[in-house]
Amino acid sequence: MKNLNVDVAIIGAGTAGLTAYRAVKAAGLSAVMIEGGPYGTTCARVGCMPSKLLIAAAEAAHSAANTAPFGVHIDSPVRVNGVEVMDRVKRERDRFVGFVLDSVDSIAVSDKIRGYARFLSDTVLQVDEHTRIEAPRVVIATGSTPVVPARYEALGDRLIVNDDVFYWDDLPRRVMVLGPGVIGLELGQALARLGVQLRLLGRSASLGGLSDPDVKASALAAFQAEFSLSLNTRIISATREGNEVEVRWVDADGREALERFDYLLMAAGRRPNLDHLHLENTSLALDEKGLPHFDRKTLQLGTLPIFFAGDADGELLFLHEAADEGRIAGENAARYPNVQPGQRRAPLSIVFTDPQIAQVGVHFKDLPTSGVVFGEIDFAGQGRSRVMLKNRGKLRVYADQYDGRFLGAEMAGPSIEHIAHLLSWAVQQELTVPTMLEMPFYHPVVEEGLRTALRQAANQLTPVQEPLQQVKSA
């Protein structure tokens, strides 16, 4: 058994772990990064980047197959070569992973330990059976894993998660997706557009994380016009029949259905990778699920010198949030016990479907029950959207009725990834709706729809009364 003493031990070498390591080293402290799985972040290897490569191929196929409304006719049907699609996805994916590996390679060998860490006490870790580490501060950046309910495990290799999709050599013929969240919607629509016979089921009314009922209804209608998507369903059984999965389910109206697929893609969310850390060996207070409480501003667990970063806290499963949390956790680990709240950015999430989905600032479900005004635009009639035949979805903005401050928005539509960025900047700068309307809006652009929504909200603001002394002096 090798013994090691270090200022900060970082468990996990993903986006959050790498950022935490750099923060600790920048503070002049010694650090070691422990990783048991493959190097290369979740985003680069099985998340953000490969999914967008698959989506890009799907968009190309969809665009080529839908030119007739423009008066452009393709003489022969569009042919999707699944082998070529997946070859490009994997080649480009490996390129992105290579950039991460280059970054990891630049870290001193003495600062990297291969293996899985577990707590022996608050400040002592053991990595597999080969290394014991004494570290007065620890950052947990172990990431997350797809949730797979036990009832489906008997399906064997016919049951897959998003990670598995990006190792396919060819596209399958039939896939059922369970879960209309970010992953389920992105991969489901992409596969459908690439010619895969697809069915997407959700057990609740949830869709892409949207909580605004009007926006959600517009997105649901757009998706259902393109591929099979059903909410509020119940799976009765899922059994393996040879190399197929036979699924029996009941829809929202009580109708029972039975169908067979090559794969069942589980997209029912992700859970933090904490099971093997043996947190029970620490003095942390754990909840009924065995999870520790932590300060969302400092990322400190209780009063201990242990910090969360990235997906491990189960909160905001986005790369930019993981990077921010890695920095905050690393800096606070370095300055412990004088921890400080970290600077967080305005909330921003984007789903890369068509129409795209996004949420910015305060979500609809979290708005106060009074004192809020709304503005909206239905993209069905929005000029530039109709020009591009991308006129699906709706955008809704929320503002404080009295001071005009822009609170947030939920949206589904074209160019939403760009509009969402503009609105997240407005939230972070605490701009008012009147100030936002003073900004330039070119013509013709999709952003003119945003201006329409902002104008509606502005017209509902309660004017601020002039102070009494000003009225008298006038």
Image: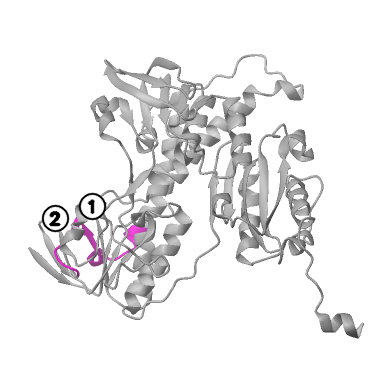
Q: In the drawing, what numbered circle is on residue 200? A: none
> Which residues are drawn in magenta?
103-122
Percent x, y of residue 188: 48, 30
Q: Is residue 119 magenta?
A: yes
Amino acid under disc 2: Asp
Q: Is residue 367 left or right of residue 31?
A: right
Amino acid under disc 1: Gly
Q: Earlier in the sequence, mark 1 or mark 2?
A: 1
**At numbered mark 2, what does the secondary structure look like: helix, strand or loop?**
loop
Residues at discs 1 and 2 in contact (Cβ within 8 Å)? yes
Q: Which residue is mark 1?
A: 36
Q: Which residue is mark 2?
A: 128
Percent x, y of residue 407: 63, 59
Up/down of 384 relative to 141, above or below: above
Judge by depth and name the residue closer to the eye, 92 or 343.
343
Up/down of 235 relative to 419, above or below: above
Percent x, y of residue 132: 13, 65
Q: Is residue 79 left or right of residue 342?
A: right
Percent x, y of residue 90: 41, 37
Judge by depth and name the residue closer to the eye, 290 or 13.
290
The answer to whether any part of residue 414 appears in the image is: no
The answer to whether any part of residue 394 appears in the image is: yes
Judge by depth and name the residue closer to the eye, 363 or 387.
363
Check the picture and name the quadrant holding the C terminus: bottom right
Q: Quadrant of residue 62?
A: top right
Up/down of 148 relative to 258, above or below: below
